Each structure stands twice: as structure tokens, then as C-alpha cells.
Amino acid sequence: MNQLRREKIGKYIQEKGAVTVKEVSALFPDVSLMTVHRDLEKLEEEGIIIRTRGGAISATPGTSPTEIKLETRMQTNWKEKREMARKALRLIEPGSAVFLDAGTSNMALAQAIPDMDLNIFTTGPGIALELGKLSIPTVHMCGGTLNRFNQAVSGQSTLQMLEQINIATAFLGVSGYTEDGGFTCGKEDEMLVKRLMMKKAGKKVILMDSSKCGRILPYTFGNVEDADYIVSDGQLPEEVQERAEQAGTVIL
């Protein structure tokens, strides 16, 4: 019965994209709110959903291309992402060229960057607009095709532009990490951009909170050994920390 109920909840969230706990609870009037919360916890452990403040979102794109707005995804572990952004700032050198890929971890970083001399390249339109509030950095918006789900541009135009740029430090978000699968994401075009930055950038910085560990998505763009730094929420599993120590990858 529990498994059947969770399957129904998971399907409902995937179809809707984003829901509140109140909505889910209304589907099962005979089930306590505590049980609903436990069901959501279990679905998140299985990688089907991501819990947010007061609700949940689908962990994979559903039937609608705009099913999860960026503002909704930003609610997930936002406090941790802001703390990670403060740590990541230590790795930015004034006057250098940096790359921020699309995603909420890099949005938090964009909001934390002070008004300083930088050349900033990004595949996130929202991130470019956020950085546009500053007066000193030069902000470069990469061309390409917009993915409405993750608000990122990608494609051949993106790759061709980035091939010509010498990036000092690249900040890359992840959608999942497992020991065998490495750093993963959900779109092939997104993976190609991340792989290029892992190859070209002087310093490769992975932004990964502990909620991403144990999740695996279709496309791998690197592993712990390929990164120079992993900026985390301080709660990464012990096996990740041990692997990083062996590889010489610094965890902040």
C-alpha cells in the first residue's frame, strides 16, 4: 500500500512539475501529514523528486517544457548554496576570466560576486542579468539554443565560442554524483559544455551540495579526479572526501 501510494505521488509530481505538501496531502485525506512527508523523503532518496520549502519538484523533466520555474528550484537547499557561494569567492582572482554555467548554485555565486574587474562568461541568461547589476565586470552571454527547463543555452554556437576563450576558473554545477557515474547531468548538450570546461579551464571548480550524492543522471562529464576543487555544504559522504584526498582535489 505504501509503495503504491508513493508511486501515485511520484507520478503526480512528475506530471505537475512542482507541487505543495498541501496538494499532495489532499490526494490522500486518510493519510497523516507526517506520512506524506515520509513519502516525499523516500521519493527524494530514490531520485524521483527534490523536496523544496513547503513542497516538492520533479527531479526529471516531465511533459511540460516549463514545468519547474527557476525560482522554484532556487528554494532547494538555498541556504547551503549561499554558503557555498561564499566559499567559492575565494577562488576568483581579480582581472581573470571565469565561467559560470547555468543553475541555481551558480546563481547564488553570481549574487555573491562583488563589483570587481572580471571577464565573466556564462550559459545562464538569468545569471547574466544578475551580473548585469554590477558596474565593473564585463559579462559575456554565450550564444546557443535556450533550454527552458534549466534556463541554459547550449549547442554548437556555445561550444564554438567557448573553444576560443581561455578560462582561468570554471564553476560547474552538478545534478548528481555517484562513485561509478561521477558528476552527471540530464542533458547531452549540457554535458558537452561542462566537458569542454573541464578540459580547457585552468581551475575546475565543482559546486555540489550533499543532496546530489547518490543520484545519477544519464550524462557524465567528469569525476573527482578531474576537478581541482569541490565546493560543498560540508556534508559530503566520507567516501567522496577520501577519494578527493587521494586525488589531490581540495574540498572547501
Image: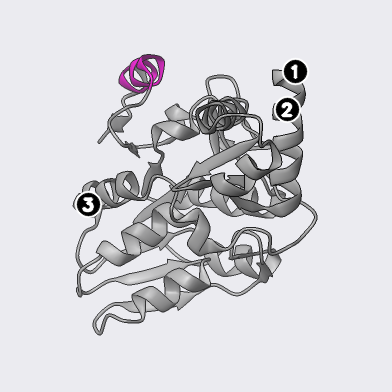
Q: Which of the two residues, 66 or 86, is positioned nearer the viewer here?
A: 66
Q: Is residue 242 magenta?
A: yes
The part of the chain drawn in magenta is: 237-245
Identify residue type, mark 2.
Answer: Arg
For this orientation, the residue located farthest to the right is: 63
Residues at marks 3 and 1, CA–CA distance in whole angstroms = 45 Å
Does dot 3 land on a helix, a strand or a loop?
helix
Q: Quadrant of residue 219?
A: top right
Residue 56 vs 158, above or below: the answer is above
- The residue under the point 53% across, 66% down is 123
Which residue lies under the disc numbered 2?
Answer: 5
Kindly identify which residue carries mark 1.
1
- SS for dot 1: loop
Residue in the image at 70% along x and 36% along y:
9
Look at the numbered disc 2 and give the secondary structure of its residue.
Answer: helix
Amino acid under label 1?
Answer: Met
Q: Relative to residue 9, is residue 123 drawn left or right?
A: left
Amino acid at the residue labelled 3: Arg
User: Which quadrant is the N terminus positioned in?
Assistant: top right
- The residue pinned by badge 3 equals 86
Give coordinates of residue 42: x percent, y percent. 58, 25
The span from disc 2 to disc 3 (Cα, nearest Å) is 40 Å
Tell me, yes or no, whether the two marked residues, 2 and 1, touch with CB atoms within 8 Å.
yes
- The residue that appears at 59% across and 20% down in the rendered structure is 180
